Structure formats: C-alpha cells, structure tokens
Image (cartoon, helix red, strand yellow):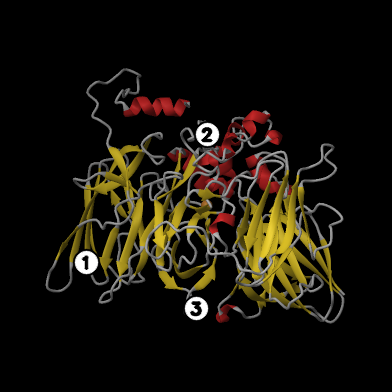
C-alpha cells in the first residue's frame, strides 16, 4: 500500500487533521464526489409560452473522488454539482433543445474565487466568463444557440483552458427532430500541480518543458473513471453507435478505435461546433482531439467480440497512470516525468529496465484485468444481433490462407544486433537481417493470410494490427481481445501465436506491440502493414513507406526527453533515392510512443507539393484530395498517404520532422534523379 493510499484511507475514515496536526473532532464529514456517466441532464424544465426554460442550480465545493473505483484512492478535489445533489466528475450535463432558455446559477463553497467559462448562448458571439467570489451566488440567463456539442468549465486556479475536474458537457439538440440515442464521454485530467506551479507553467517560454520539470502526478479519466474502472460498453451487431467525445484536459489525445473505422462528423472547440466537409464524415481509426476540443463520431459494430477505444499516447494510458495499487498488487506512482522515483521503474518493464527477472512481467501478467493499461481506455463488447454473447467467429473461408511467419528478436547480448522483426513466407524472400523497425508486411485485399507470430524475445509480448478490420481474437490485446471465455493470450518467450486476417480494404496500417511499455515499443517492435489490390504488386521503387518512431533502450520518460531517439525508418538521417519525372506514393506512419509531429517535405526553393490520398488507409474526402504544400501534423496511431510528382531533373528534398513546439527532431534526405 502506498503512502498516498494510507493517507487517503485515513482521510476517508474521517480522521481529519487541522493544519497544526491536531485532530479536529468537530470537522464535518467530507463530501463524496460521484462519477457522472452523462446520461441525465441537469436542471428542471418550465414550459412557458415562448420557449422552454431550463433552470440549473450549480455549486462548487471540495470533496473526495475515487476515479479508480470504490477500492481505489480517494482524491480531494474541487468539483461541481447541482444544489441538493451530489458533487460529480465530470460536472453536471447541460442538455437542452435548441431554442431553450437556460438559467444557470453558481454558488461558490470553495475558499478561492471561481471563474466559470462557457455559460453563454452558442450563437457565434464571444463568451464572457462569470466570476463567483467565495460564498457568493451568481446567475446567468442565456438562449441555447445552435445545436451542437459544447462544454462549460470552472477554475479556481486561473487556468486558461479546461483543466481539472470542474467541467462538463453542454449539448444542444436540434429542435423538431428525433434525437438518436448517443453517449457523451468527457475526458478530464487529474494532477497534483499547485496553483503557483500552474502559474509558472502558463507563463513559461516552454510550458511543456516546465510541466515535465514540475514532474506532477497526473492521470486521465473518462466520465470520471480510470481504466479498468471505466464503464464497459455493450452494443449489438449492426446497431449504429453515436458518441460525443469532449477533451477537458490540457493535453492532445489521439483517440483510437480498435477493429473498426469511425466517421468523424463534427469537430468543435467548446464554443463552435462544425460539420466536417464530407457528407458522410471523415473515415478514420484515430482522431486527434485538442485541449478543449470536441468530437462527434459514429461507427457501426460489424464484428462481435471485445474491442477498445483509447488514447494512443502511451503515457496517457500506461500502467504508470494508476494512482492506487493495481489489481495485481503493484504500487504505481502516476508520474509522467522523469525522476529518480519514476513510476516506470516501480512498475518494472523487463530485464532492461533494471529490475530483476521476477519483477519484469508483473505489470503484464495475463491474469491482470488491467491488461497493463490505466487511464483513458473504454472497453467495448459487441454482442450478436439478438443481444446474446456471440460464439466463435464465422467459419474461415475455405481458401488455403497464405502463410507468413513473423519472428520478434531481442537485441543480441553484445548489443551489435538491435531488437527487431523478420518476416518470412511462401512468397517472401528470407531477409538478410533482422529489421528494426520490422519490414513492410504486404497483404492483398480479400486474401486470407495466416501469420505465425514467434516470440524470440526474453519477455512476453502481444501484436496489434492497427487499423485493420479483423476478428476480435486476433486484435492483439492480451486478456481482452476475443469472444466470451476465448481471449487472446500473452505470447510468452518461445511461444507461437497464429493470427488469421482477411483484410477487406486496401491501405496503410501498422503492426505494433500492444504491451504498453515504452521500452518494448522503442526497441523496434513495430512496422508498416500495407494492403494492396489482389492483382497489384507493391513496388518499393515508387511506393515509399516512411515510419516515424523512437529508438531507445531507456526507460519511459527518458525517451521523451531525448530528441536523438526520434527515428525515421529506424534511422536518424535516412537517405532515399526517387526516380525523376515519376508519380510516387509516400505512406507516412507515426508509431512513436507519445509524439505528435509536424512533418514537411521541402526543397531549396520551398515546400514540395503533394496530394493527400488516404488517412488511416481510407480515402480522404474529395474536397481534401487536392494538391497543396507538403506539410502535415501526424499523431501517434495515424497514417497518411500522399502522391508526389517528382521533377524532371535532379533535385534534393528534405523530409523534416519537428515537434508541435517547432523543435527539430529528425530528417530524411530524398535525392530525385
Ligand atoms: Cu491522450
């Protein structure tokens, strides 16, 4: 049991101490903060002649919240609730029909002044914040404005963006139409930053560096809970799923759905909410949601089994995000930054992390229901059409599958050979060497393939086929992927696991270890997966896969602090040669543990022109498939294909990779000749 756990246990038991350390027997009991699943709208409705009036009476107060369930630690936080009801995280849901008038009052039971943002009409005008002194009440009255997904939030720390737990969804439904059932997921960020530290970060030249230097304890929640305590969602085959995802945290989250595409329909910033410029939405498997951003999405569960929706930034879902003890008894710290007591060491990630062999696999125990993850992860179970647990997947096609063998090798003891992957098969030449990252695995649309995974590492692993539509059992989340009792095993050293896939669509995808371990991913256990048309031959002379990742043997956070660990196709400065006056395809993949990068292709006379073809393997909307300057922001878990016409004569191009802060990370050289 951690110190934190002890402290909070006593706090919860009512043994409160005044600042001088003397027990205060008269202290009132601490309020409990509930979690809010965003299925019930706050307030009361009055039907009047002109338009409905919804009255919501909010209050801000401190309370104890248990984001890891009743057995997890209690965190003392500031939160919002309705008067006469429990405090909650996220804050109460404001949900009205377009044209409704809202009357919202806020009572401040905190000791600091409260500033509330977002209590305004969504009609395009600016939204002035509402200031509520300690002990005071303030009330605002406003029309709903346009239908859409928005949010409101409060701060006692002068935070400039939604930050911490006092924020919630504000949904305006269109008038006069039936609203299809949907779900609302609000992401919040808990951390232990003090107001003075936050002030320092906000005014720093490099806020990210200052944030890491402060080394706060931090965790991310969805609807007030952290995996594995997050709500388990159940759907029937074929039933459309509609979600609104709101990011009320300070971080960008690339949200990834396993096994299915989803359609991004609307994107917003809390005040505005706009339809994407494509009639059916934009088809993706990963969508970046910026701080204060909102995402409206739809998808259809087409295959039964267990699936995940999670942030692809490893440090937002790694077991280090756990605040209390894990189900397998590990103590975890929750720190995101680097320090002598980094939680990544405590959780133990294999022999190279410095622990002993017994510690190595604790966090990845196949029996551990947390599956080596924590934080912003949702588990989804798709049942059959009748709502019954589905049985075994439909019988495999009678065609004899093509055979591939993918062997995962560890680094040699002398360090001369890096860890990596080789792929052999009935129509693939035996590789000359182990590649790190792994080589392109080229599959054909509609052609069944059986890939035998061979674990030649000294630690257990699991392989995820990112972006592919496949049977749940082969999706690569050990202890979770599958149907009923038949779930995917962890592949332990020396073991094999056969994966059967029949890719239904062409595109650029990724294979990568799904063990949430910085070192395992950064040792090269990833590679590109390309699906081509049945009659098509993949031609590496004009079809270029460029994989962005990290290479480091360091534990967790050290990787993030080391720009020299950024690699392109496993190298710091790769050189490529492209034929002149030819149409080329560039397949760009980001599978670094945590990074969101800005990538550009430039010549001495300015940016190159390219034409976007696909995102996550799916064709981009026609309106976006137009030539433009070769620059893209790509998050971990995203792929983009571009078409480039090379000039007729010799020319040097640079593929530059920079952080979102503009800092240079790595560079590739293209010689057109
Ligand atoms: Cu994230």
Q: Nearer the viewer, mark 3 or mark 1?
A: 3
Give whichever of 77, 134 is nearer the camera. Answer: 77
Residue 278: numbered disc: 3
Secondary structure under the numbered disc 3 in the rendered image: loop
The residue most toward the top is 22
| Above or below, comparing residue 310 to residue 639 in the picture | above
Query: Badge 1 local density, few (<14 within 10 Å), some, or many (20+)?
Result: many
Secondary structure under the numbered disc 2 in the rendered image: loop
Q: Quadrant of the C terminus?
A: bottom right
Give whichever of 511, 339 is nearer the camera. Answer: 511
Secondary structure under the numbered disc 1 in the rendered image: strand
The mark that comes first in sequence, 3 or 1, is 1
Specify the quadrant of the image occupied by residue 465. bottom right
The structure residue drawn at horizontal position 51% and vertical position 41%, both measured from the top left corner, is 321
Query: x, y percentage for residue 21?
Result: 35, 19
> Circle 1 sits on which residue?
101
The mark that comes first in sequence, 1 or 2, is 1
Left or right of 655 on screen, residue 364: left
| Above or below, comparing residue 357 to residue 232 in the picture | above
Mark 3 and mark 1 in contact? Answer it, CB < 8 Å: no
Q: How many circles with numbers are drawn on the protein?
A: 3
Query: Badge 2 local density, few (<14 within 10 Å), some, or many (20+)?
Result: many
Specify the quadrant of the image occupied by residue 225. top left
Mark 1 and mark 2 in contact? Answer it, CB < 8 Å: no
Left or right of 525 on screen, residue 93: left
Residue 380: numbered disc: none
Alpha-carbon span between mark 1 and mark 2: 45 Å
Alpha-carbon span between mark 2 and mark 3: 44 Å
The mark that comes first in sequence, 2 or 3, is 3
Give whichever of 90, 489 is nearer the camera. Answer: 489
Residue 333: numbered disc: 2
């Amino acid at each position: 049991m951690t110190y934190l756990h002890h402290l909070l246990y006593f706090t919860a038991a009512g043994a409160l101490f005044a600042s001088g350390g003397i027990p205060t027997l008269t202290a009132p009991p601490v309020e409990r903060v509930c979690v809010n699943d965003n299925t019930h709208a706050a307030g009361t409705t009055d039907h009047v002649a002109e338009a409905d009036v919804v009255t919501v009476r909010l209050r801000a107060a401190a309370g104890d919240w248990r984001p890891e369930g009743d057995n997890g630690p209690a965190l003392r936080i500031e939160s919002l609730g309705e008067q006469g009801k429990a405090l909650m995280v996220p804050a109460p849901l404001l949900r009205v029909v377009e044209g409704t008038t809202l009357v919202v009052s806020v009572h401040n039971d905190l000791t600091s002044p409260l500033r509330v943002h977002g209590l305004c009409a969504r009609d395009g005008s600016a939204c002035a914040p509402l200031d509520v002194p300690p002990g005071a009440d303030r009330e605002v009255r406003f029309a709903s404005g346009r239908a859409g997904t928005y949010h409101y939030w409060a701060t006692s720390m002068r935070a400039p963006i939604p930050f911490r737990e006092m924020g919630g969804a504000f949904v305006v439904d269109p008038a006069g139409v039936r609203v299809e059932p949907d779900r609302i997921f609000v992401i919040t960020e808990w951390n232990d930053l003090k107001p003075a530290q936050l002030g320092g970060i906000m005014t720093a030249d490099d806020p990210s560096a200052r944030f890491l230097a402060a080394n706060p304890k931090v965790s991310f929640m969805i609807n007030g809970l952290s995996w594995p305590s997050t709500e388990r969602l159940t759907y029937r085959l074929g039933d459309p799923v509609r979600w609104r995802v709101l990011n009320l945290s300070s971080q960008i989250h690339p949200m990834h759905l396993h096994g299915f595409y989803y359609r991004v329909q609307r994107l917003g910033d809390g005040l505005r909410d706009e339809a994407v410029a494509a009639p059916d939405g934009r088809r993706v498997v990963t969508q970046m949601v910026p701080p204060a951003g909102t995402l409206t999405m739809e998808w259809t569960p087409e295959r039964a089994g267990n699936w995940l929706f999670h942030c692809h930034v490893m440090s937002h879902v790694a077991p280090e995000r756990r605040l209390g003890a894990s189900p397998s008894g590990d103590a975890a710290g929750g720190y995101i930054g680097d320090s002598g007591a980094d939680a990544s060491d405590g959780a133990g990630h294999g022999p190279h992390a410095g622990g002993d062999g017994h510690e190595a696999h604790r966090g990845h125990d196949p029996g551990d229901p947390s599956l080596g993850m924590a934080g912003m992860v949702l588990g989804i179970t798709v049942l059959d059409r009748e709502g019954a647990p589905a049985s075994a997947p439909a019988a495999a096609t009678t065609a004899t599958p093509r055979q591939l063998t993918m062997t995962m090798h560890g680094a040699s003891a002398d360090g001369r050979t890096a860890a990596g992957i080789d792929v052999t098969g009935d129509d693939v030449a035996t590789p000359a060497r182990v590649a790190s990252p792994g080589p392109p695995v080229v599959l054909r649309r509609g052609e069944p393939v059986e890939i035998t995974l061979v674990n030649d590492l000294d630690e257990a692993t699991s392989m995820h086929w990112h972006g592919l539509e496949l049977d749940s059992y082969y999706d690569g989340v050990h202890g979770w992927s599958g149907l009923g009792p038949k779930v995917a095993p962890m592949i332990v050293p020396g073991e094999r696991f056969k994966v059967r896939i029949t890719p239904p669509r062409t595109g650029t995808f990724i294979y990568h270890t799904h063990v949430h371990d910085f070192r395992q991913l950064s040792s090269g256990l990833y590679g590109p997966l390309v699906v081509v048309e049945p009659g098509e031959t993949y031609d590496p002379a004009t079809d270029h896969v460029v994989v962005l990742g990290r290479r480091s043997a360091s534990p967790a956070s050290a990787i993030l602090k080391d720009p020299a660990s950024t690699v392109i196709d496993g190298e710091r400065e790769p050189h490529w040669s492209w034929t002149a006056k030819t149409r080329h395809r560039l397949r760009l993949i980001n599978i670094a543990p945590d990074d969101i990068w800005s990538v550009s292709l430039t010549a001495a006379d300015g940016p190159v022109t390219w034409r976007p073809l696909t995102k996550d393997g799916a064709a981009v909307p026609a309106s976006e498939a137009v030539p433009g300057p070769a620059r893209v922001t790509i998050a971990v878990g995203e792929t983009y294909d571009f078409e480039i016409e090379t000039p007729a004569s010799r020319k040097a191009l640079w593929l530059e990779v920079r952080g979102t802060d503009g800092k240079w990370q790595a560079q590739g050289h293209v010689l057109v000749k």
